[in-house]
Each structure stands twice: as C-alpha cells, then as structure tokens.
Amino acid sequence: MVVDNLRRSTFGSEEAIHGPNERLDYRSARWLRSQEVKSGRYNNASEVVREALRRMEEDDERALRLAKPTAEDILTDLTEEQLDGIRRRVRASIDGVEAGKFLEYEGREGLQKLADGVKARGRQLLARQAPGK
C-alpha cells in the first residue's frame, strides 16, 4: 500500500485524504492528521499508516499464536505458582521412574490397556463427584 503523496480533496462538505489507490473517509482522515500533527509522534501520514499496519500485523500474529499455542506460548502465560506446581509434579514423576514405580505397556494391546485404565479411573472420579451419589 503506497501512502506517500497523499492529497486532500473535498467530497461534498467532507474532506478526505487519498493516495493513488487508497481513500480515507473524512473521520479517518481527520484522525490521521491529528496523529500526524497534534501528537508530534509522527512526521507524516505515511508513518501513521505504517505504524497502524505494523500493529495490525502484530495483532494477527498474536491471534494465530493464541489459536495454536506452542508450549513456549503456554508457559509464558502461566503464573510462577502454576509453574512451580508443574515442576513439582514432573520431579515427583521422575523420582517415581528412578525408583522403579512405573508400568510398561507394549504394542497396541498395551496402549489399549492403558487407555481402558485411564477411562475407568475417570468414570470412577465422575461417579464420586456426581450430585446425589
């Protein structure tokens, strides 16, 4: 998007800014000029538009990260207390493995046995939590 060489023009009683291929309505053009001139943060309209586009790109990237977070993204959002809890559980699991407290599962039958056990424990837990039982 080329925004250099912006021109002011009047459409009826409303003034707008437009470039070779882009047009802004009166409200947007007024805001753009206020950012450019009044705030003093930008030297020209192009800088304002580039900054707005950069922020839009960052928002899009953030939305993608939230839609498909990596382990690193998830860890960044955890509190220190949550991370400490995870570390304790991982350490306890490692200690259990080192002490020989684990079960081995082999092949499809082993995975099916593991899945059946997990489901059975889950059903038992849900049954204990169900109201009226």
Image (cartoon, rainbow, N blue to C red):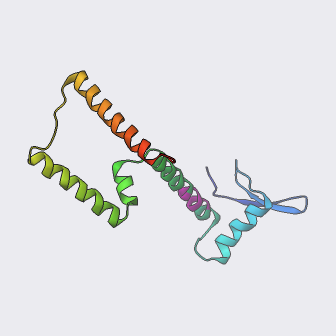
Residue 15 lies in the magenta-colored region:
no
Between 43 and 48, the residue placed more toward the observer is: 48
Q: How many marks?
A: 0
Q: Which residue sits furthest top?
A: 108
Query: Residue 78's quadrant in the figure?
Result: bottom left
Residue depicted at 61% across the width and 60% down the height: 49
Between 90 and 14, the residue placed more toward the observer is: 90
Q: Which residue sits furthest left?
A: 99
Question: In the displayed structure, would residue 94 be above or below residue 109?
Answer: below
Between 97 and 128, the residue placed more toward the observer is: 128
Residue depicted at 16% across the width and 36% down the height: 103
Between 41 and 71, the residue placed more toward the observer is: 71
The picture places residue 27, in percent across and down from the top left corner, at 77, 63
Residue 59 lies left or right of residue 127; in this view the side is right
Question: In the displayed structure, would residue 63 be above or below residue 13?
Answer: above
The picture places residue 112, in percent across and down from the top left corner, at 29, 26
Residue 9 lies left or right of residue 91; in this view the side is right
The picture places residue 17, in percent across and down from the top left corner, at 75, 59
Query: Residue 38's quadrant in the figure?
Result: bottom right
Residue 50 lies in the magenta-colored region:
yes
The picture places residue 85, in percent across and down from the top left corner, at 29, 60
Residue depicted at 8% across the width and 48% down the height: 99
Predominant SS along the magenta part: helix
Q: Which residues are magenta?
A: 49-55
Residue depicted at 28% across the width and 56% down the height: 86
Q: Which residue sits furthest front?
A: 133
